[in-house]
Image (spheres, rainbow, N blue to C red):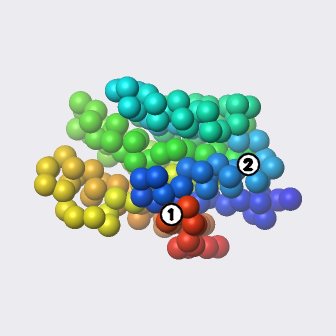
Amino acid sequence: MSYQQALTAELILGGARSGKSRYAESKAQDSALPVVYIATAQALDPEMDQRIVHHRESRPAHWPTVEEPLLLAQALQQAAQQHPGAVILVDCLTLWVTNCLLHEDEQFWPQQKQALLDVLAQLRCPLLLVSNEVGQGVVPMGELSRRFVDESGRLHQDIAALVEAVTLVVAGIPVAVKRP
């Protein structure tokens, strides 16, 4: 089975607990290709630590995991070089955006976003990018929250323009938004 037949680059969006991670993991596993998992979460509190443990336990133990909360473009490049022919699954862009926006250097986010978009334009491997759809609610009251929603939305639009497929997961059901 060729890469084009098996899997394309896909952005997978959904709300909290929508089933987007489960969908991405199932799709990666069903590809019958090796899988590299890039996790962006940081355990900054006990509740987040529990979420990370849950995600670790829900995926196959033989999948190599790269934990990279900030330098995602670099992690993608390295994974593609070290594991040619593997599916790369990133979970999740939402946490990565948060991590970058909270960085002390104001230029960090724009630099990392551009680096990611540049890498995505060059990568030629099966790729699944998981992220929360955050733009369907009310406009947040706080400045940082509004910036997060704005930047996440812009990132999703930029990535959707680059990848072959976009899927919205609602109540565990994948809905095709864009297909090759």
Distance between the alpha carbons at the discs numbered 2 and 1 = 20 Å
Residue sitting at the far right: 1
Q: Earlier in the sequence, mark 2 or mark 1?
A: 2
Look at 70% across and 31% down and name the residue there: 61
x then y, percent, for residue 82: 70, 33
Can residue 42 be seen at all in this image of the molecule? Answer: no
* Circle 1 residue: 171
Where is 110 relative to 11, above or below?
A: above
- Does residue 20 appear to the left or right of 65 in the view shown? left
Give amino acid for label 1: Ala
Give amino acid for label 2: Gln
* Labelled pair 2, 1 in contact (Cβ < 8 Å): no
Question: Badge 1 local density, few (<14 within 10 Å), some, or many (20+)?
Answer: few
Image quarter (top left, top right, bottom left or bottom right) of the N terminus: bottom right
Look at 32% across and 63% down and name the residue there: 135
Question: Badge 2 local density, few (<14 within 10 Å), some, or many (20+)?
Answer: some
x then y, percent, for residue 167: 55, 66
x then y, percent, for residue 26: 68, 52
* Circle 2 residue: 29
- Does residue 106 appear to the left or right of 8 in the view shown? left
Where is 101 relative to 145, above or below?
A: above
- Does residue 154 appear to the left or right of 173 in the view shown? left
Mark 1 residue element: loop
Where is 177 relative to 32, above or below?
A: below
Mark 2 residue element: helix
Residue nearer the viewer, 55 or 90: 55
